[in-house]
Amino acid sequence: MVVLDGSVLSRLYPRVSRYNSPYPAHDAGCAVDLYPDGSDGPDGRALAAPSPVAGAVVDTRTVACPQRPYATDTDHLIVIDTGSHLARILHVEPAVSPGDTVAVGESLGSLVRSGFFAPWVTNHIHLGFREHGQNAVRASGSLPVTLDVAVRPAPWDGTATVTAVGDTWARLDAPSHPAPGDGYAGLATDGGGVVDGGLPHYETGYATTDADPVAVLGRAVGDRVSERTVAWRDTVGVTVDDTAVQGLSLWLGRDELGCTVVAPGHDHAVGDRVAVAVDTRAADTE
């Protein structure tokens, strides 16, 4: 288990997410996505990608990725020896080379809009770890990661205002951070914990509640498969104003919270008031 320093996360990354991805490392709780200041800018790029770790750069690679009209067709891997582990960093075009040493917060390069991203995903740093002697280039094999941060639950009644839109998504101003700037917060479960991830458009999510099943907005949405990992139920859906959407993109926020509705082909506009609900009617009819 690798423990990430909460003070580093809080200083450098306004948003973090462990499970907001369809890839196996996230499903297993072995990676975290870090969103630096500026990663939500108008052109989708941050000016720099601050390093979450200190150490010596041991490798950089450029790799092909799926071709998407909204993304580049190559991605990048940076491997840093932290002394205790090998850190694997993805989605950053490196401005560093093997043999360089980096400090926490030093720029590693520029974020790239990777073809591995879904269109509703904003640019970020993907971070995972390997033991010394492990192959750090292969996609599989990362170690479990935990975040040394307290996370406040943010209750929500499902109502919100649309603050930004894209072809496949609409950003909402709720749930609201209960204490902006004073640590991370996440959408509250009905049991008092928080959830993180793509609900339910990715297979698993993160929940800090001990309750099983995990419930959100008055409905049971998933079943615990490990201490922090929840498998979303196949019968769960999300609606906005009674219209089915693909899901909710959730994260942990430091200064503000909110969430993103994943809804290709939607007709929402900035300023719209909407009502979000969890739909389990398929389960209710069994």
Image (cartoon, rainbow, N blue to C red):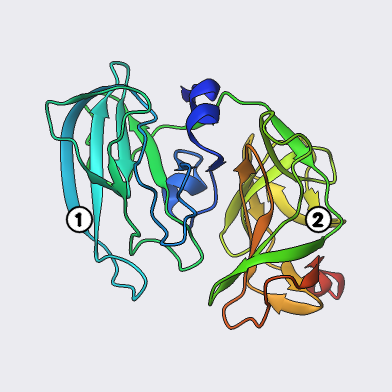
- Label 1 SS: strand
Q: Quadrant of residue 267?
A: bottom right
Measured as percent of width and height from the top left, residue 135 is found at: 22, 36
Q: Residue at x 35, y 59 (%)?
A: 113
Measured as percent of width and height from the top left, residue 244 is found at: 72, 78
Q: Residue at x 85, y 46 (%)?
A: 190
Q: Amino acid at mark 2?
A: Ala
Q: Is residue 18 left or right of residue 124?
A: right
- Label 2 SS: strand
Q: Quadrant of residue 260?
A: bottom right
Q: Quadrant of residue 123?
A: bottom left
Q: Amino acid at mark 1?
A: Val
105 or 138: which is nearer to us?
Answer: 105
Camera-nearest label, 2 or 1: 1
Which residue corresponds to mark 2? 220
Measured as percent of width and height from the top left, residue 108 is found at: 27, 37
15 or 1: which is nearer to us?
Answer: 15
Q: Which mark is residue 63?
A: 1
Q: Residue at x 48, y 24 (%)?
A: 8
Q: Which mark is residue 91?
A: none
Q: Is residue 69 left or right of residue 20?
A: left
100 or 31: which is nearer to us?
Answer: 100
Residue 136 visible from this viewpoint: no
Image quarter hosting the C terminus: bottom right
Q: Residue at x 35, y 46 (%)?
A: 47
Q: Is residue 158 left or right of residue 37?
A: right
Nearer-N-terminus badge (2/1)? 1
Q: Residues within 10 Å of mark 1 (few under 14, many from 20)?
A: few
